[in-house]
Amino acid sequence: MAILLRKKISEGEDVRIKTFRLSLPSEEDHTGHPLGEEAGLSEPIDKDLIKLIG
């Protein structure tokens, strides 16, 4: 990846990298709702978030 980036930069290409950083609380910090697979049954992921992540 680094070699490809260096090549593109040296050739004057526009280089963009999209990154996502996500920090979730530990399981001990969760109370009052299900975790894991059960959580998806009652609270599905927002469709706009799915589109954003792609």
Image (cartoon, helix red, strand yellow):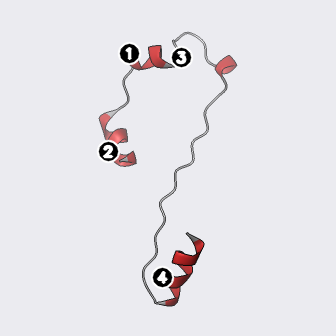
Crowd rating for badge 3 (residues with CA inside 10 Å; few <14, some 14–19, many 20+): few
Q: Position of residue 30 (x, y in %)?
A: 61, 18
| The quadrant where residue 23 appears | top right
Q: Position of residue 14 (x, y in %)?
A: 42, 79
In screen coordinates, is 1 left or right of 27?
left
Q: Nearer the viewer, residue 54 or 46?
A: 54
Callout 3, which amino acid?
Leu
Crowd rating for badge 1 (residues with CA inside 10 Å; few <14, some 14–19, many 20+): few
Callout 2, which amino acid?
Lys
- Residue drawn at x 49%, y 65% as measured from the top left: 17
Q: Secondary structure at mark 4?
A: helix
Picture disc at residue 35:
3
The residue labelled by disc 2 is 51
- Tell me which label, 4 or 1, sits earlier in the chain: 4
Query: Split into 4 quadrants, where in the image is the N terminus?
Result: bottom right
Q: Nearer the viewer, mark 4 or mark 1?
A: 4
Q: Secondary structure at mark 2?
A: helix
